[in-house]
Image (tube, helix red, strand yellow):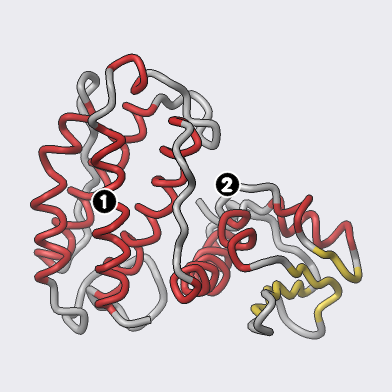
Amino acid sequence: MLPTRHLAELSGSLDTLSAHARQPAETLAWPVPACPGWSLADLFGHVGAIERWAAEIVRGGKLVKEGKAPEEHAEAWFLDGAGAFLETMAALDPEAQCWTFGHAPHTAAFWLRRQAHEHAIHLVDACQASGWEMPAFAEDFLLDGVDEALAMFAPRQIRLERMAQLGQAVTFRVPDGTSWTLGEGTAAATISAPLREMYLGLWGRSNLADTALIEGDAELAHRAIRGPLTP
């Protein structure tokens, strides 16, 4: 997926997130279903901290320490930094060498992709919390997000011991036939789901165990779904 597409998706999600952040204080106190213990205001504090962290990495090319959101009025802090963050993302050179936590190549394009999906998932969170209509993401973007989750995040989760080794290979498949396999050798289980459900399910924003077609070793498949496949 081209960096221009990532930027377009990021910009659209950021616009809608900003509209959510301008809601009344009583709405911003509502809980975020997928993030236990978080209010909407807390969500915006997290997004604002991630934006500032990612932008500083892109500008310097090196790992920096992530900062913390203010304890009060985090939504205003998020809104205050959103414009500068988007300007940094729009101005980056996708081919520039840059620290990332993904696999090679280590370029700034990683951060454009990562932030596009970071904001998309948290837009889903905001919509679920506020009762707004869920966003309709383009198919190429959803496919790219599934690839990020299964080709980059899931192996990293296992490597960092945040997710247990599965013992046998598991294949994830979406309707166009695209598939990803975790583990070596012949897959002992296959998990198939509609593209949107796969995308949201990998991030715990829908129940993939209920929506997926599971073939082969069901216990193995459910262990893979529980992961956690993503942070």
On residue 205, which mark appears? 2
Q: Which mark is residue 167?
A: none
Q: Point out the tag, 2 or 1, that comes first from the N-terminus.
A: 1
Residue at position x 16%, y 38% in the image: 79
Circle 1: is it few (<14), some (14-19), or many (20+) Cα within 10 Å?
Answer: many
Q: Percent position (x, y) of residue 72?
A: 22, 19
Q: Is 18 on the left or on the right of 183, as rendered? A: left
For this rendering, which residue is in front, 76 or 65? 76
Farthest residue, direction top: 26
Q: Residue 125 at x, y = what percent?
A: 46, 40
Q: Position of residue 186 (x, y in %)?
A: 81, 84
- Residue 14's disc number: 1
Which residue type carries mark 2?
A: Arg
Residue 40 at x, y = what percent? 37, 28
Compared to residue 230, the image places residue 130 above or below, namely: above
Give the residue displayed 50% in from the left and 72% down from the top: 139
The amino acid pointed to by label 1 is Leu
**Residue at 36% over, 34% down:** 43
Answer left or right for 38 relative to 46: right
